Amino acid sequence: MSKNWFVAAALAVVFLVVAACGGGDTPAPAQDDNASAQAGKELFTSLGCVACHIAGGAGGAVGPSLDGLFGTQRELASGETVTADRSYIEESIRSPAAKVTKGFTEGTMLSSFGELSGDQMHQLIDFIESLK
């Protein structure tokens, strides 16, 4: 009888631990998108991106405007059309010559920002996405 009691107690403990942990199905807490976009805006300014790109109606016109960019179709200098999604924007920041927007010349963006951390890139893209 004591063996059955021990097995039942062990199963009860396992059940309680799994229930308390959510069975591993608990999603990670959502990051505050507004805070991330605000951090991206500050990064955009501190990196000097604002000198060449219009964002929020202000900035330079050397490079493509970022206002309303996210989710749109972009025609490239190659004639190809791409969607300005997170992947495209990250590639454009890290490797500016990879896909040049029609009307702009390869090499216009002199710096790549491959040294940005994943968090910094996420923040910049959140900021660009917020420019609707």
Image (spheres, helix red, strand yellow):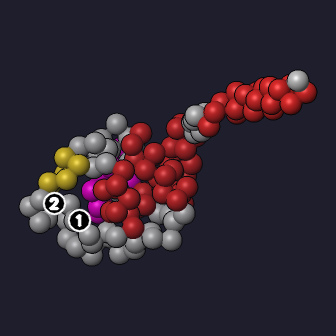
Q: Nearer the viewer, residue 52 or 95?
A: 95
Q: Residue furthest front?
A: 1
Residue 105, by quadrant, is bottom left
Does 111 sit above or below residue 129? below
Question: Magenta stretch mostly in which secondary structure?
Answer: loop
- Say which mark, if any, is on residue 123: none
Q: Is residue 58 visible?
A: no
- Crowding around mark 2 (Cα neighbors within 10 Å: few <14, some 14 to 19, many 20+) is some
Does 33 sit above or below residue 47? above
Q: Position of residue 125 (x, y in %)?
A: 43, 50
**Which range is magenta?**
57-66
Q: Position of residue 72 (x, y in %)?
A: 23, 43
Residue 119, by quadrant, is bottom right
Mark 1–mark 2 CB contact (< 8 Å):
yes
Q: Nearer the viewer, residue 5 or 39?
A: 5
Does 22 sit above or below residue 55? above
State left or right for residue 123 relative to residue 69. Answer: right
Q: Which residue is mark 2?
A: 76
Magenta region includes residue 77? no
